[in-house]
Amino acid sequence: MCGIALIVSGIRIDTSSLPFDSTTATPTRKSEKLLFSLDDLKEALRRRGPDSFGAKKVLLQLLGQNGVSSFTVEEDGDAADGAIETAKLHFFGATLQLRGINPLVQPLTDASGNVLVYNGEIFGGLHLASDCNDAEFLLQTLGECCSCGSCATDRCVECGKSSIAGVLSAIKGPWAIIYWQDSSRTLWFGRDAFGRRSLLVHWPTVDDSTFLLSSVSPVSPVQQASAEYEDHNGIGCLSYWEELPCGIYSVHVDASKTSGYLVGEVKIHEYTNSMLNELIKWERISVEPSSEDLHTFCHKLSLGQHAKHQPSSEAVPNKTGSIQPAIPMPAHILLNALKESVLRRTSMYTVYQAVISGIRQEKFFPVAILFSGGLDSMILAALLDKCMDPSYEIDLLNVSFDGQLAPDRKSAKAGLNELRRVAPSRKWRLVEIDADLSDLVFETSHVMSLINPANTYMDLNIGIALWLAAGGDGWVSDANTYDNDGNHVRIKYKSNAKILLVGSGADEQCAGYGRHRTSYRRGSWLGLHEEMRLDMQRIWRRNLGRDDRCIADNGKEARFPFLDEDVIRLLLNIPLWEVANLDQPSGIGDKRILREVAELLGLYEAAVLPKRAIQFGSRIARESNRKNFGSNRAANQASAGSVTIHRKSNFC
């Protein structure tokens, strides 16, 4: 996980060609003034990338009618030979290094004057050695790309070189990038197609002509105290930042033909990977079943249930050594795909060796799970056990705002017992993170800056819960037994895992939300499909950017196995009625295919657990409602789930 940022000054940015709402990216709109210093920005980035920090500047000069010259200098450097700079691109990079064998400091530069800051992981699509760092590999690969800037395919039809859009489209995994291609005087930036890594943008406005990109919104004492930060209209103030919509963008910098200044038009480029574009459209092959389809599925299901109870002689081993029926059911196929997804995200070759220097091997726990004991986190835990060396303990991070009484704490303890049953040789460590909302005054204000531009109480509740859970600072029991009678001594403990597995994407793809059941009642299978597609196409805006910022603020990296490209494609290839059956009750028909996966893993208790969101399972929503509205009833009457936060509210 890294923190990246760019500040562009002295260039007139033209956003007129962007396909967004005209009020979003136009220089005539007004925005909230967010007052922060470079030190504020650097501090916010360093929290995301604690291993190293660097900054570089690209200085641009206008050479009359002859064009533009550029040169890269260190942060405190100036233009050469006393020349006066016309514009400046100020790059910042803070790194949490999880790959490679040598220390790395961003921004990265090469001999051609290209500059890169990168926050992401390459899990596939591009071929790099196991000991190679993603960012170094990407700098080299992008440095070999075409510089025409107009290629709409993987390769330039004129020079035959790879296009920048083609390279970025090929990456399997989460990424956000800012890249300066010096030969073409072009700035490239963007996010992966599902927005699994945060990248915020401040488009130039009438109030502030600066163009900014950042992984996170900095917070400063000036901002917190400013009267301008308060909403005077009762509906929330205009935000300084926006979530950058997923895509690949470029700004070619050139001299204005009519005036003495530099200009740059923002263009958005299509992903060139046809398979990726199909995933973005999120079109399912089979949505509405015929009576024959349902009859066939019921027959297959009965065969699958029969196969579970047959001796292994009636089953065959697959290439990974696991046993499955001779005719694989969709759940078996999905189980294998999820296992591969977890393996890609937790293989030890991806963990930078310096991470474990100075830590005794038996004390190093590379991967942890944000753990509620619910269906999704239980599946991830069981799969991680199959992918991780048995010598490592696995931390299960559980947050509660009601001590041992919160639903998520109870299900986490029950889940721990079930994991010990299915994986008795593994050492599982349940980290109980207890919190009292009334004690979190500073922390709440801090998380408000992290969730920005999200601004509802629901976002804040989720953000606080995720931020505390990712911090891993809690208590562990001295017991290593099945009983949880509460009499065991609890010991203070802080997880040092740098990689956190998170279950995001499971509900959206497998009909886990209550609104999916509502859509199914109103519009049958087609209505359900449309609602699920809407969820997947807006997950970058509603969930992933916020979650990334809250988790990464602890110097941890969130990884999302359910949002692996291969898993998404597989689920779309499975008929919808085999993914979920919302005619059945909650805990049975919703996320039906994942419940079958849980059963295949031996997680029979987890397989019937109903969906429970983190804000309710941890009981932060209840405590928040009482604090800000007086009661749950008053909060419901005020539609607390969508009420906008006053930036200087009692919540601060």
Image (cartoon, rainbow, N blue to C red):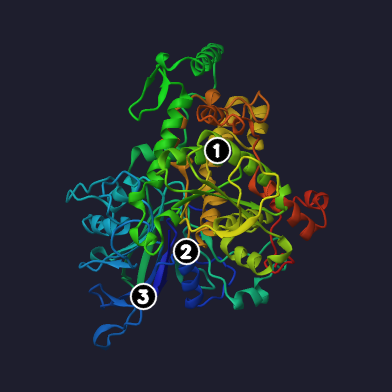
The alpha-carbon separation of the residues under discs 3 and 1 comes to 54 Å
Q: Where residue 187 sits in the image (x, y, percent)?
A: 34, 63
**Which mark identifies residue 82?**
none
Question: Where is mark 1, residue-wise?
Answer: 419
Q: What residue type is labelled 3?
A: Lys
* Foreground of the two, 587 or 75: 587
Q: Residues within 10 Å of mark 2 (few under 14, many from 20)?
A: many
Quarter of image, res 336: top left
Residue 453 seen in the current view? no
Q: Mark 3 or mark 1, which is nearer to you?
A: 1
Which quarter of the rendered picture does the N terminus lie within? Answer: bottom left
Label disc, if present, on residue 48 of the rendered structure: 2
Observer-side mark, 3 or 2, equals 2
Element under label 1? helix
Question: Label 2 is placed on what type of residue?
Answer: Arg
**Mark 1 closeness class: few <14, some 14–19, many ≥20 residues within 10 Å:** many
Residue at the image position 63 percent from the left and 66 percent from the top: 443
Amino acid at pointer 1: Leu
Label 3 crowding class (10 Å Cα cut-off): few <14, some 14-19, many 20+?
some
Tell me the mark number nearer the camera, choosing from 2 and 1. Answer: 1
Element type where label 2 sits in the image: helix
Q: Is residue 499 visible?
A: yes
| Residue occupying the point 59% across, 25% down | 525
Image point (55%, 38%), residue name? 420
Q: What distance separates the C-alpha of mark 3 from that of mark 2? A: 25 Å
Q: Which residue is drawn at 54% across and 63% down?
A: 241
Quadrant of the rendering where the C terminus is positioned: bottom right
Q: Nearer the N terminus, badge 3 or badge 2?
A: 2
Picture disc at residue 88 = 3
Badge 3 element? strand
